[in-house]
Image (cartoon, grey):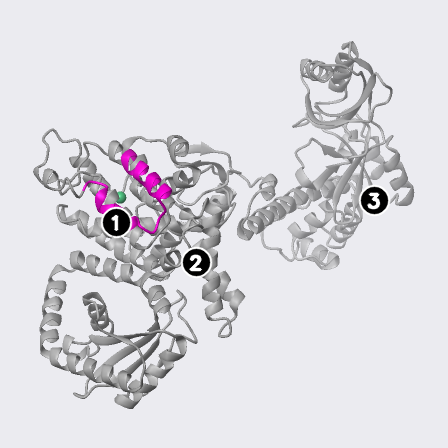
Amino acid sequence: MGTHSGDSVKEHAAASRRGPSAPGPALNNAAAASFDGLTHKLDYLDPAEIRRVRDAYRFADEAHLGQYRASGEPYITHPIAVAGLCAEWKLDAQAIMAALMHDAMEDCGITKAELIERFGAPTAELVDGLTKLDKLQFSTREESQAESFRKMLLAMARDVRVILIKLADRLHNMSTMGAMTPEKRLRIARETLDIYAPIAHRLGLNQTYRQLQELSFRYLRPWREKALSKAVFKARGNRRDVVERIQRDVERAFAQANLKAQVFGREKTVFSIYRKMSEKHLSFAQVNDIFGFRIVVSTLPECYLALGVLHQLYKPMPGRFKDYIAIPKANGYQSLHTTLVSPLGTAVEFQMRTEPMHAVAEKGIAAHWMYKSKNSAPSNAQEAQRLGTMWLQSLIDIQDETRDASEFLEHVKIDLFPDAVYVFTPKSKILALPKGATPVDFAYAIHSDVGDRCVAAKVNGEPVALRTELHSGDVVEIVTTAGAKPNPGWLNFVRTGRARSKIRHHLKTMELEESQDLGAKMLSQALRAEGLSMPPDDGPPSQHSVWPALLRWSGTRSREELLTDIGLGRKIASIVAKRLARLLTEHGARPDAVTLTMGRYGQDESAPAQNMVLIDGSEGLSVQLAGCCRPIPGDSILGYLGRGEGLLIHTTECSVGKRLFGRDSEGWLSVDWAEQPTRTFETGVSLLLHNGKGVLAEVATAVAAAEADITHIDMGEQAVADSAELKLLLAVRDRLHLADVIRALKRSAAVLHVERVKP
Ligand code: MN
């Protein structure tokens, strides 16, 4: 259950939308539903941009007409509020427009094509991205899965503006959950705490991060939250004098040092106090840094000056000074931190930073848009990516000398826009795969057995080809069949090393099994030539068995290995057979009943083929048909046992084969075709054609009429002006079948000449 239609925040809204009775509170909020509330926040945009935003508002307003929020307000109040949050971050016009229309596609049946037509592709892409994110729902509690889910969201967003709008959407939904059922509130709060708050933190949006945590905490632990808020409120009253006194002292000290600085008192959030208490097993009274101060100065050197002033004023606590200016946090946060002992003996933390550092500390990546000039609104996703990268670049500049910059860039880049796809199993487990991964990679990632037996796949419930590229958010299901085998063709498209090596391993094993079968065939044939049958492999080698002696002699560890060696041509069957015959005689185990003399055997006219390895096409990789002469059943053939490469079959007329035979007559083996080959075989024919329209179709028709298949076409060079050369690979049953095909081709008017290809 990885995907659901609609975020449940919206499901709730949907439940009450288009109700028969007009809800009361909606009328009172008519003003909130208008565009005016938003306009004054948009003064950083130019008039043309504001006109386009207004256009998007009208479109959204019409789309959501008659829909209401759970609270009874008109639905449009929600997109307006989301757009308002985005405007506070000074996001560009496209992002504000997308924020206004972010729920329009899913809820109101508006298509992406419509949005492209009216508002252009970049804005439509943003809305589409938001709609896709909306369909994802996180449902497990495992921390590792939460991390994968966060990465999946980032991978799917691709454009950082989509994430920013999504965070604004979540923030507004979290602050308007009052009318929902408690179960729904709990689930959404859990998801916000596990998924969205950490994303806000990663992007450096600390204010949003704290707000999301506070709101989640309120719904997840309502009693805890109430008690702690009360305690903080009381402590605030008790310490008001202290805080005011410290503030006065500090401001006076700065004035005396002639340093212009803004001094803000600040308070830890209830959630961060709660977390500190539960992580460090402290009571509320033991958490002593509830209050602190933030000093904002004009220049970077003044941060250090301010530090000096403070350290002269109060005694610093050893080991509590941290220089996040020289070594910023991974999300770009910069400040000096120090903890001082106040006049009353309590510890108080101070943070020193400049104005831009303060903006980054509170708004993170969004601060980038605030400082960007108005005219450089991103025109498309690449541009937005580039801006995201610029933000990262500015982070690198900050810590240029402190760390390995390129490593840092890679790290943050992967975090922000992961170069991976995240997909669901049918049971909602999330798997990370490299970009371009296919269902086969997915199958091997689950288990090598699933990969080996995989025959088909479904993505989001639809059957797809096994080579289909997977996308983040896909739900992937693998169909397996007992006894299915990996296809060597998979190696052409799998992306993971795991799938690749598992497929190779399986093919290797298959090859060895096939070679072993061939070796057994060859050895028993060679034994027949000695007048023997294959000695039984009767379990553990007994004293009387000849196998241990034979294995010792051959230097192999097992019967299987010996047979494989013979099949691969590493050992000669006739030599092994002769040795075995001698061993049997030495053991006195050569029973006369099966002893046949060579002479008698040779006279046995009824079984001439017994002396040969019979080829039926089922041998797999251990038998190769030579590519020069491409033998087919009916051809007279010879087998060449190359060292370690299995058995290579040539026709007896093949010139390449003859040359090989001249060089190495030892490795040749008599082979023949089995009575009933199990498959068709490929061979080449070359054609001379009239050069004209439709000749290829005529050739194809002729071949099909003769019930053969064309497996490859090679256009030759033009022989004469009005004729063309063509080479075909045909799959035929045997020579007779090939003769039929050639006859059929000759009958075709387009064909001038046809013959089988010979080396
Ligand atoms: Mn929404």
The residue that label 3 is drawn on is 667
Residue lying at 16% horizontally and 83% vertically, measured from the top left: 245
Say left or right for 699 vs 351. right
195 to the left or right of 615: left
Q: Nearer the viewer, mark 2 or mark 3?
A: 2
Of the residues shown, which amino acid type is indicated by label 2?
Asp
Please tell me whether residue 540 is drawn above or below residue 287 in the rendered image: above
Would you place residue 407 above or below residue 538 in this image? below
Q: Is residue 364 above or below residue 692?
A: below
Is 317 a magenta residue? no
Give the dominant element type of the magenta stretch: helix, strand or loop. Answer: helix
Considering the numbered disc 2 on the image, is that residue within a helix, a strand or a loop?
helix
Label 2, residues with CA under 10 Å away: few <14, some 14-19, many ≥20 = some
Q: Does residue 243 appear left or right of residue 515 in this picture?
A: left
Query: Which mark is first along the chain, 3 or 2?
Result: 2
Of helix, strand and loop, which one carries label 1? helix
Name which residue type carries label 1. His
Task: Locate ligand 1 by image quadrant.
Answer: top left
Query: Which residue shows up at 10% across the image and 32% down it?
Result: 22
Distance of label 1 from label 3 (alpha carbons)? 91 Å
Instruction: Give the alpha-carbon distance from disc 1 to disc 2, as whole Å.
Output: 35 Å
Amino acid residing under circle 3: Gly
Q: Of 298 and 571, which appears nearest the observer?
A: 298
Tell me which numbered mark, 1 or 3, is placed earlier along the sequence. Answer: 1
The secondary structure type at the circle numbered 3 is loop
Please give the label number shown on residue 415: 2
Classify mark 1 as within 8 Å of ligand 1 or not, answering yes or no: no
Residue pictured at 9% horizontal, 73% vertical: 234
